[in-house]
Image (cartoon, rainbow, N blue to C red):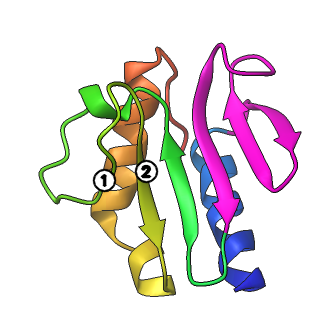
Amino acid sequence: MTDLVSRVHALVRELYPDAVISVNGNFTGYGSTTGYKGLVFVVSPHKAHVTLGLASGASLPDPAGLMEGSGRVHRHVKIRTDTDLDRPELRELMRTALIHQDVTPAG
């Protein structure tokens, strides 16, 4: 699981190399500023998966149905395997999340 966590972090940094990183316990936030304001992604490890949180995910298109959650604003994707992480639909969703937050994705 540690390798998968590292790969999720690497993917976020690849697409968002200028992100300001905030760490709070096991949660790592990536955004334009520290803290909640400007947040785009949150990575949190769990025993059976890695959660990739998407701030404002509820307003993003998700044609592949990757996101879970029922909150008014945020959604998340549970990444259980390398195959989940390597899905092109995940990269597209992450790029869309960045654009939605007025960030130009890299890569």
SS at mark 1 in the image: loop
Q: How far across and how far down the image is residue 49, in percent?
A: 56, 77
Amino acid bearing label 1: Met
Q: Is residue 20 located in the magenta-colored stretch of the structure?
A: yes
The residue pinned by badge 1 equals 67
Question: How many discs appear?
Answer: 2
Cα gap from disc 2 to disc 1, whole angstroms: 5 Å
Q: Position of residue 92 (x, y in %)?
A: 32, 49
Q: Position of residue 77 (x, y in %)?
A: 41, 58
Residue 22 sits inside the magenta stretch:
yes
Residue drawn at point x = 60 percent, y = 59 percent: 11
Q: Which mark is residue 76?
A: 2
Amino acid at dot 2: His
Position of residue 98 in the picture relative to residue 65 (left or right): right
- On residue 53, the disc is none
Residue at the farthest left position: 63
Q: Residue at x 49, y 25 (%)?
A: 104
Q: Which residues are magenta?
A: 17-45
- The x, y position of residue 43, in whole percent, is 65, 53
* Mark with earlier residue (2, 1): 1
- Disc 2 is placed on an element classified as strand
Task: Say above or below: 101 vs 17.
Answer: above
Q: Residue at position x 49%, y 81% from top?
A: 80
Q: Is residue 45 above or below residue 38?
A: below
